[in-house]
Amino acid sequence: MNQWMERNAKYTLVDADSQFSIAFAGMKFEESDLKALAPKFERATREMARIEAGEIKNPDEHRKVTHFTDRRSYPESELFRSVQTFAEEVRSGKITGETGKKFDAVVVNGIGGSALGPQLMQFAINGPYWNEKSDAQRNGYLKIYFLDNTDSAEFADLLEVMDPERTLHLVISKSGGTQETKNNMIAMENFYASKKLSFARHAAAITMKGSELDRHARENNFLAIFEMAESIGGRTSETSIVGHVPAALTGVDFASFLKGACRMDDWTRTVDPEKNPAMMLAAMWYIAGKGKGDRNMVIVPYSDRLILLSRYLQQLVMESLGKAYDLDGKEVHQGLNVFGNKGGTDAHAFIQQLNDGRDDFFATFIEVLKDAEKLPITANTEMGTYLHGFLEGLSAALRGKGRQIITIQVPEVNAFTLGMLIALYERAVAIYAEFININAFHQPGVQAYKLAAKGILALREKVMAKLKELGSVEGTAAEIAAKVGEPDQAVEIGGLLDKAAANCPCVSRRFCKKSNAWIYRIG
Ligand code: PA5
């Protein structure tokens, strides 16, 4: 055996039953690097056990972290059964919209952890053209759309294809107060009212008990309200009710998805870190980035169905690991950049840089072994053979240049393997967080962003009220800021006026070349 083969055999972990494998040999590390991590492995093993024992592992929010354990018992729960029943009653037409028409589409309104998992699952399992399929091809399950921002264009685009009488609205917000989600709900309620229809008779919610959304849904008699456990975080909620309801409404085998996740949970409880894929994955991230995230993680699935995986992992990894302070309150500014798209195609895009440019990354290739179709290209080759060839060719070329690679193989993209992939990364993130001593389960930066937006909205109210008092006003942003008594906020006020000029008939602007500034006229 040559050295590469030996190394590959030593550092490839295989779950033969599920045919899931992960190969670390293409990363730059030695056995001594793993041995040096022994104290970190020990700590991570101990802390993962504490998480699974239900101890408080999100100290800032003083909460448990139960997504690893809840998913094992979830299929036996009353909640699971109630989701299955609800979905079946929607599908069969027992539950209908206000006018008695059978639902044929669901709009999922949520953001971040309340959207990315369901989006990944839909694309991976039902494929890109699900909504174009006939009712019979969908087997009576619903088409699915997403509202995951506070962008009027996204909303307008949806209205162009949405039949309000036949659409079910699933509002997902753990906290029940997220502004973007609330905005879409309010705008949709207004739209239904304009059509003389009741939004509530077309709506269901997933949220924590007692939240603003929970109260709203109860007061208005939504068709269903599903409770989300406080101990499950947004970005780790795909194996909970958040993933389940959209899956059940669109015919995805959620029980199989959970089985896949639980299989990975079992595998990644392996005590020997070198036989534990999540420990090894976290170790690779740590060694490659010197424990400071000095290398970018590039996710390259050789599968169109997995194109949203990098977006999903970007949130899971970066919202979990991108932290200013460690658990001892020391300023550390940790993080790990994640980007990616899809293999094959990207050889014509960013892979140029991976090949020849900055050596500041490690790539993770994900190969799907079984071809969806046999499509002969020549007498001896098929479409899938080429995809494999491109993967192997790129992998060898990158390794030849000393670039670093992890390779995952899955037999096919299905609910089970998707469950395995998601659980693997959830656990690697939790383990890596222990290596670097941070809380992976809170998101203070996101809260700060929410507050900053509130500040701008409050400034807008103040400026608009003052401008109303002043009547007709003209000037640069700085002049207007001075007039309304906010001279230090000229840049922000300029931004507000740019937006207003495009949207309010009472505000206009012209560009003055001489002063190189916009001149605004209000009133
Ligand atoms: O991972 C997280 O906690 C976030 O991305 C949340 O999922 C996101 O902010 C949405 O929150 P909520 O579900 O409370 O509306």
Image (cartoon, rainbow, N blue to C red):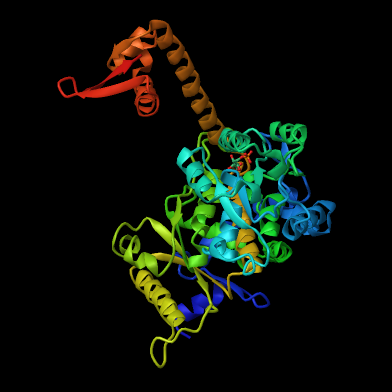
Residue at figure coordinates x 55%, y 36% from the top left: 180
Front position in the image: 450 or 146? 146
Front position in the image: 180 or 261? 180
Front position in the image: 215 or 235? 215
- Would residue 493 be found to the left or right of residue 99 on screen? left
Q: Is residue 261 above or below residue 463?
A: below
- Would residue 425 be found to the left or right of residue 219 on screen? left
Quick one: which residue is furthest to the bottom in this view? 379
Q: Is residue 167 visible?
A: no
The image shows residue 489 at horizontal and vertical percentages of 38, 17
- Would residue 431 be found to the left or right of residue 214 on screen? left
Which quadrant contains ligand 1?
A: top right
Quick one: which residue is furthest to the left in this view? 514
Residue at figure coordinates x 67%, y 35% from the top left: 176
The image shows residue 304 at horizontal and vertical percentages of 48, 67
Q: Is residue 87 visible?
A: yes
The image shows residue 98 at horizontal and vertical percentages of 72, 44
User: How many callouts does the rendering have?
Assistant: 0
The image shows residue 50 at horizontal and vertical percentages of 74, 48
Quadrant for residue 376, please give it: bottom left
Residue at figure coordinates x 63%, y 34% from the top left: 193
Q: In what quadrant of the picture does the C terminus appear?
A: top left
Quadrant for residue 177, please give it: top right
Q: Is residue 518 above or below residue 191?
A: above
